[in-house]
Amino acid sequence: MTSNKDRREECVLVLDTSAFVAGFDPLSTEGEQYTVPLVEEEVIESSVSSVRIKAATESGRLKIINPSPSFIEKVKHAATAIGDKFLLSETDIQVLAVALELRAAGKHTTIITDDYSMQNVANELRVQFCSLATLGIKYRLEWMRYCPACHKRYPSNYGAKTCEVCGTQLKRKSIKKNNLSKAPEMKAQAGNDQCPK
């Protein structure tokens, strides 16, 4: 049986842009760490975050990889199902896909992000996440889109940003609130125990 200490040592971190913005330093944490090239592009050049990414990459502590297309599709499918797809950037989708791919390879994966939509989708995918600068989500939400002017309702995956009837900018509201899912490896740790200190 694996102890909690061993589980923590086996944990692989996947870092979103918000982790670097919140001050996460990959050199101060043990274990495997990954991010995607788009995160590196989003960070302001010559910023502290940029310097940290470069130093961690050069030292081999941080690996920058691209996810497989099949995992990108799985993320898009899950995000569409719960209504968060239109709020995710391509960077967000790739970070989620890398985490899902690493988990599928048998690694205990935790995404470090303060983005609530990413946390919502990660939970739908049963991938562990933790936040650094925010409290994180308490429930997984499913969304619908609607027109605040004429009240026409649209499915969460509706492609346009404006109402087809009156042209008003669409809004969203939650239609279902679920308790956060717990993946088998998530059950051993509660809350943010997996978050790096």
Image (spheres, rainbow, N blue to C red):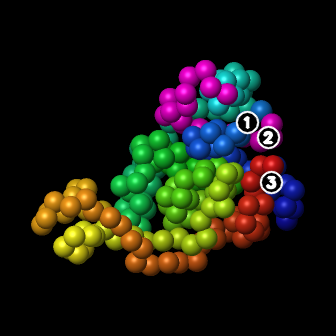
Tell me if residue 38 is in the magenta stretch. yes
The reply, left or right, for residue 149 in relation to residue 96 is: left
Identified at 75% across, 68% down, the residue is: 190
Residue 38 - label: none
Q: Are marks 2 and 3 in contact (CB under 8 Å)?
A: no
The reply, left or right, for residue 159 in relation to residue 81 is: left
Residue 171 occupies which quadrant of the picture?
bottom left
Identity of the residue furthest to the left in this view:
165
Sort mark 2 into few (<14), some (14-19) or many (20+) by Cα contacts within 10 Å. few
Q: Label 2 sits on what residue type? A: Thr
- The reply to whether residue 165 is visible in this rendering is yes
- Give 186 or 191, whichever is nearer the viewer: 191
Q: Label 3 sits on what residue type? A: Arg
Residue 29 - label: 2
Q: Are marks 1 and 3 in contact (CB under 8 Å)?
A: no
* Residue 177 on image: x %, y %: 50, 78
Residue at mark 2 to residue at mark 1: CA–CA distance: 6 Å
Q: Label 1 sits on what residue type? A: Pro
- Give 89 or 4, whichever is nearer the viewer: 89
Residue at mark 1 = 26
Residue 195 occupies which quadrant of the picture?
bottom right
